[in-house]
Every structure is written in C-alpha cells, then in structure tokens.
Amino acid sequence: MATDKAYKVLAKQEEISNNQAKELIDRGLVFAGDKKVKIARAEISDDTHFRIEYPSDIEIIYQDDNIVAVNKPAQIDSYDIQDAIEGAELLHRLDRDTSGVLLLGRNKIFIEDAIKEFKARRVQKQYIAWVEGVLYEAMEIDAPLLTIKKGKAFSKIDHLRGKKAYTKVTPEEIQGKKSKVRIEITTGRTHQIRVHLASVGHPVVGDEQYGSRTQSKHMLLHSSKIKIFDYEFEAPEPKSIARYK
C-alpha cells in the first residue's frame, strides 16, 4: 500500500497548497475517521479520506464604545479574533482549544482601566469543563505556576519560582468515569485550569498535553461567564460540552 506525508495527501485531496494543508493540520482541524491528525509529516496511506472541521462563526455577544464580548469557538486563536474585529484589542486571552466569553476593548482609556482590573484580580471568571475521573466534592487548588515559553507554552506547579494561582472546582454532574465541573479563578496564569486540574488527577477531557487519555475533537473547557466593572457576559455551552456522552 502506497503512503505519503499526511499534509501532501490532504493537499491533493482538497486541491490546496502543501502549506495550506500543513496549517489546517497544525490548527487541529483535520480528522481521519474519528481521530484528529496531529502530525503533518506523519506517513499515512495515500488513499486516506480526510475530514476538515472548521470552527463555527464568531458570535458577538455584546458591543458598545468600550467593549466587545465574543463567544469564541474552540480551535480559533484569540489573536485571530482580534484581527477580525476592527478597532478592538484583546483584554485577555483564551487557549486556542478553549471556547466561550472573550473580551476586547475599543478605546485606550477603557483598555488601560480593564487591564488594571485583571491585574488586581477583580474580574470574576467562571468556566465549565468535563474532566477525567469522578469528583464528588468541591475543592480549592492553591498552587503557584511556572510557565516555560520555549516553543509550545507549558506550565507546571513550582513552589519556588511559580506565580500565585488559585482555582476553585465544584462538581455539577457525573457521567460514567467523567465529571462536569464549574471552575472559578481569581488569577489568570497560562494553562492554569488545565495544570491545576491535572495536578489533582482530573485533567480536562481532550487535554492530551496535560494527561487526558480520552479522544475528543477539542478540549472540553468553556469560559462561561465573566464580570468586569458593571458588565457581565455569559456564553452558552457548546453542544460538545452541554451534550457530552
């Protein structure tokens, strides 16, 4: 059976350039059967049929002269949303695989004030996630995080060099050996929720970087609610989380 590199097979199937095919694979949008194609240069049968799952359209929840609240789809970079909304600047970021409320500012004074609110930990942030294992009781995780940004960002608990990070986890539903949880954070460290949950044996479903062994189209973590100043925004759960089986 003849084989070729995955990106070349995809490029031929879709009649696109090799670079375009590589980008689609790197963005996590390409599937063969039920499995995500992770390595663009992996050898694969040249009669493999790929499926590309593009993210849903960007939905603006609210906007005025100060702020834009977006319901960010999973598998879209926060900076891509900033580029798509003219005259708006990110106030914070969500991981590419995380869906939900994302905030952008529209004028310099508001942006500066909002960033101060984030730094002062006065912004209320709530998330929903499915995690590995059964979680019966609420827990608080107070463990400092160190982020290493060589290549792909990676964070770990480090009590000597880490920055303060606090996460509160409350179970909402149990299904088989998975739990649906509500998460509140007062700090916003890189990969904070993912690392903290993994550290107590409950990585987010689909988060292979931090130990999930469950195949999923994307990581099942959703920014459900944010409150800043007198603004409060909520994003409904995507089907992948609301109807997880």
Image (spheres, grey):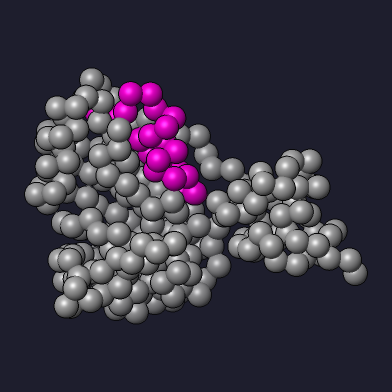
Is residue 41 toward the left or the right of residue 56 in the image? right
Q: Residue furthest right?
A: 1
Relative to 38, residue 120 above or below: above
Relative to 81, residue 122 above or below: below
Which residue is rendered at x = 84% and y = 60% of the image? 46
Which residue is rendered at x = 59% and y = 43% of the image? 54
Specify the quadrant of the image occupied by residue 176: bottom left
**Which of 188/16 is in front?**
16
Q: Name the quarter where the N terminus is drawn.
A: bottom right
Magenta run includes residue 95: no
**Which of 11/176 is in front?**
11
**Which of 108/214 is in front?**
108
Relative to 3, residue 108 above or below: above
Q: How many marks?
A: 0
Q: List x then y, in percent, for residue 27.
A: 55, 51
* Magenta residues (range): 67-88
Which residue is rendered at x = 32% and y = 28% of the image? 88
Q: Residue furthest top?
A: 65
Does the rendering let one see residue 193? no
Is residue 84 toward the left or the right of residue 114 in the image? right
Relative to 10, residue 58 above or below: above
Is residue 112 toward the left or the right of residue 87 in the image? left
Magenta run includes residue 84: yes
Is residue 76 toward the left or the right of residue 11 in the image? left
Q: List x then y, in percent, for residue 39.
A: 63, 63
Which residue is rendered at x = 16% and y = 78% of the image? 160
Q: List x then y, in percent, for residue 187.
A: 18, 57
Q: List x then y, in percent, for residue 61.
A: 34, 31
